[in-house]
Amino acid sequence: MGYAGVRGGQEAIAAAERLIRRDRFGGSSRWLELDQITARLGLAVDRVMGEAGLWAPERAARAIRQSRGDLLEAAQLLRAHRSTLPRLAYGSPVPAAALRPVRRIAPAHRNPPGGQVLGATDDYTPRILDLTDEDTARATAPPPRRPATAGAPVTAPDPTLRPAALPPAGLLADRRDPTDPDPFDITRAPARPGAPRSARLTSMARAETGSLTHLWYTVTRAPHNDQPEIPLELRRGHLPLRVEHPFTGSPVTVAGVRVTEARTVRSTDRPRPDGSRFDIGYGLCLGDNEAKALAMAGLDLLVHRDGATDRLEQNVLTALDGPEASGYLEHLKLPHYVDFRSTIDRIRAVRAAAEGKRP
């Protein structure tokens, strides 16, 4: 449906598309290569892949370039592309201990087994804009790294960097649910309140990062949640992707995917269901996205534990999807003159009735 007042019809739409293409690929700068986006804007690429639910760095870079840096639009483009791909196989379950970390911190422990591994982080650097001139920055830049590939083999994890236990043993609540043996596939069926935990975790893994963080912050700062959660462990690294071999039936590692994993606990001042243990939340998302993993773990814990947030599950399942929310917002720019005219007619009828006149 087009605007009746727009001149040219299809010609105007084609002209609008040409203007977009000029903004996307025009200008005086050099052509923006895909490897520049994946290498220099890695966090943006990871965020788009996570919100689209597809691990494809080059495709994500194309989406970012096509959307002119609009990460919500890029996630929408990549998710639409994902819907066209055939489903060849299902991944086999992989234990968290199989993750080979490049960064691992345990805020709840002073000296966790294997020690703290800071890795690449800006947690301890001041948030100051670097105003070094371009020539000096180029001259002092470190040499480029060898690009990582999604299909690179994953070596065995370091046994000293296994997920930290909470001493003494037995203080963590068991969150396993025998009625939820297989992950809920939110791409095949909509997740609604009352869905299993796997549906919540999957929905949050694909959620828009800013919306997820905002919801977690709003709920966790509420007066009835005066006891904050404590991150038990935060890890970032490569997780093997394993599928069942079509002939032998044995699991085979076919790729390694970068993920961020977080586990968080909440104190027992408001125990539910067991006051003798810590409640625990879990988060795991694609790529390097520590804020998302931590907020995801916090919301997982809050939905499970706090009776004052009964509507929280509904928000987690239905209100955090970036492409869905962005699509609804974008549709407002389409023609609505019929609805608007109908509303005007109703308002006039109400006013006429209130004045004692016939509409």
Image: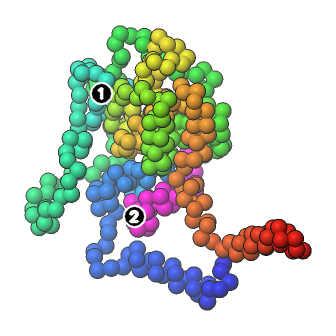
The C terminus lies in quadrant: bottom right
Going by the image, does 355 lie left or right of 113?
right
Q: Is residue 66 magenta?
A: yes
Going by the image, does 236 lie left or right of 64?
left
Residue 145 visible somewhere in the drawing: yes
Q: What is the C-alpha distance between the residues marked 2 and 1?
A: 34 Å
The residue closer to the viewer here, 242 or 347, is 347
| x and y percentages locating residue 129 in the rendered image | 21, 57
Which residue is drawn at the image coordinates 29% and 80% (left, top)?
28
**Residue type for callout 2:** Gly
Which residue is drawn at the image coordinates 51% and 17% (left, top)?
271
Q: Is residue 286 above or below residue 161?
A: below
Q: Is residue 309 magenta?
A: no
Reading the image, the residue beneath label 2 is 69
Q: Quadrant of residue 59?
A: bottom left
**Residue type for callout 1:** Pro
Reading the image, the residue beneath label 1 is 107
The residue closer to the viewer here, 19 or 82, is 19
Label 1: which secondary element: loop
Which residue is drawn at the image coordinates 40% and 36% (left, top)?
294
Residue 174 visible somewhere in the drawing: no
Tell me where the magenta segment starts and ends, as one range: 61-89
Q: Work out which residue is located at the far bottom of the displayed protein and give it.
A: 8
| x and y percentages locating residue 84 in the rendered image | 58, 56
